[in-house]
Amino acid sequence: MSSTATEMRRRRFGHTDLQVSEFGLGCARLGGIFKQQPAEFENILSAALDAGINFFDTAAMYSQGESEALIGRTLRRRRNEVIIATKAGWVLPAQQRFIAGLKPLVRPLIGALKLSRRHLPGAARGTFSQDFSPRYLRTSLEGSLRRLRTDRLDLFQLHSPPLEVVQPADWTYTLETLKREGKIRYYGVSCDAAEATLAALTHTGLSSIQVPLNLLERAALPSLPVATSRGVGVIVRESLANGLLVKDLTLEQIRQYCSSDEETSAKAARLQNYRQVAADCGCSLSQLALQYASGLEGVSVTLIGVSRLSQLEAFLSNGVGRACAGALSTVD
């Protein structure tokens, strides 16, 4: 993948001094007791950096902290080459905190028995809650720094805060304090709803927003010009619509992603149209989707999420979708 590394473009991240790769690695799928061995995840991280990806987005809750630990263990010797972004705000239930400590013992057993997540009783998963209090944010940050084996974070984000949390400026005081202490360089908000995104953009000091945005889900589009005008970097996640823009699914399978028959029919029709556009231009639907997200005005970095090295290699092939650049003019 050495040829790809020379092609990975860099972009300025808002008004910060960070230069981020056009595509970043979303690390939510790294780790976990039902997946691969840690060494295989480490290979993904190393290969991504070797290919020119320098932006790694994780969170304290991902795989009960294992995602951060994998990044810290794998990239610590190349810390100055990478930009690490993590998130805080979700609180792991007691059951998952307990499981986290048993992973080295449980993982081999699960592999031998060929168990999957669906075999896990609902009670064992527990119920997640959120906490954006100054004390919790600071505690979460300290834990992330330990797992990531670093003394500072390049970007610290609130993780999916509701509108009532985002609107007041209380949280900005906490993050500004952490910034003055040198523990974080910049801070931002990872948003789920368009209203929360626009509310976050009203606060001074904000350096980034992270939004779900793809060919099928475009609610975040109005926030892009606002972010650009205020010098705020934009991180796009779910650029492949959680797999809808990768897999060739039946109507019944598409229905599992939708809340009504009308939504199912509409998405199926749009998917068919985009698949034809991509075919006419000689690229895949996933390439078209990645280029759409990355090519939007104001987008700094587009995240790709993988759990296998072969998936990363597939995304990186053909310039990660640049072959589809000509097709974008026909996308509605």
Image (cartoon, rainbow, N blue to C red):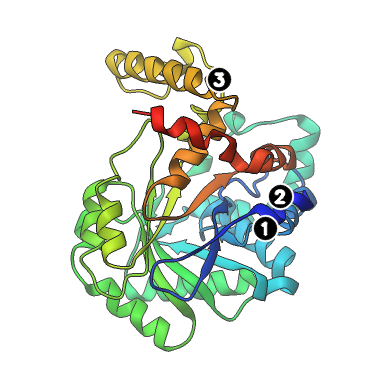
Say whether residue 94 is left or right of residue 258. right
Residue at point 68% right, 44% down? 33
**Which amino acid is tagged 2?**
Thr
**Which amino acid is tagged 1?**
Gly
The residue beneath circle 1 is 52
**Which mark is on residue 279?**
3
**Which amino acid is tagged 3?**
Ala
* Residue 270 percent coordinates (x, y): 38, 20
Q: CA distance from mark 1 to mark 2?
A: 7 Å
Residue 76, compared with residue 69, is above or below; it is below
**Dot 3 or dot 1, earlier in sequence:** 1
The answer to whether residue 236 of the structure is visible from this angle is yes
The answer to whether residue 307 of the structure is visible from this angle is no
> Cβ–Cβ below 8 Å for labels 3 and 1?
no
* Residue 207 percent coordinates (x, y): 37, 69
* Residue 168 percent coordinates (x, y): 18, 68
Q: CA distance from mark 3 to mark 2?
A: 23 Å
The residue beneath circle 2 is 4
* Residue 260 percent coordinates (x, y): 29, 18
Q: CA distance from mark 3 to mark 1?
A: 28 Å
